[in-house]
Image (cartoon, grey):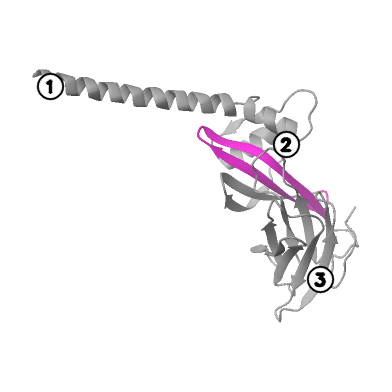
Amino acid sequence: MTQQTKRNRMMMFTILAVILLSAAIFYAAIFIIERPGSIADRRLSEAVGMTEGILEIPIGKTPEEAVEQFRGGSSSPYVIHQEPVDKGVLLFKTSTRQGSENLQVEYVRNTRIGWKWVWGGGFSNHEASDEPSAVHYMSLPELKGVSTPFPMLFGYVFDPSIVRITVETMKDGSNEAKQIEVGPDERLWFVFLPSSADMPYEIKGYDESGEQIASKMIDDPNDSGIFDLGTTASSAP
């Protein structure tokens, strides 16, 4: 083996060792940031106003597993839709309990070492209620200091005469909602708003001809409720 060949082989080994060491340091840093109870969890705990202790959010192999581990497996809601978003996915989940249908959305972030629950929320649709039920909605605000796809509004459309939904803000104008068929005469709707969007929000429903036939003005970033055709009904209790 010539001296030049030895030098080339030594250089290759050195380069490989540097690459492996860099990868090890990179993943070690990610683990320190993302492991349960570490930097990412401390940041989220501060964002939600926890004054004692911090959240310890586990890492899952899949988005569903990440949610189940964090929620403690107390329920088994059915995933009706997955929506890819920047850095992760939104899981829309539903379950029926005690005469009400629950709709939950969970944001799960994709880290280099697995999936990690970040934030979510939901509401119940009481089937026995006498309240009007053309559109059900919930608002999820932006979480300061934590990267999420929020603010957003989401809910169900039960009235087939509503074929289009928008959410309007004073500063950012009209934002078109995406709709997903999830059952007979039942559609999931959701819309992402710019972080600059200020309250109030106005939810508008339109028929096939483009005529506005339902609307609801909300001024609470954590609002949820229901409204009927042609009304601006107050939020459900």
Q: Nearer the viewer, mark 2 or mark 1?
A: 1
Q: Secondary structure at mark 1?
A: helix
**For residue 93, side relative to residue 109 (left or right):** right
Residue 30, percent from left and from top = 53, 28
Q: What is the magenta range?
A: 98-126
The verdict on residue 128 being magenta is no
The residue shown at (70%, 36%) is 71
**CA gap, disc 3 and disc 2:** 37 Å
Please name the residue that numbered disc 1 is placed on. Answer: 4
Residue 74, label in figure: 2
Q: Secondary structure at mark 2?
A: loop
Please name the residue that numbered disc 3 is placed on. Answer: 214
Q: Nearer the viewer, mark 3 or mark 2?
A: 3
Q: Nearer the viewer, mark 1 or mark 3?
A: 1
Q: Give, as a three-letter code, the residue at label 1.
A: Gln
User: Mostly what secondary structure, the magenta segment?
Assistant: strand
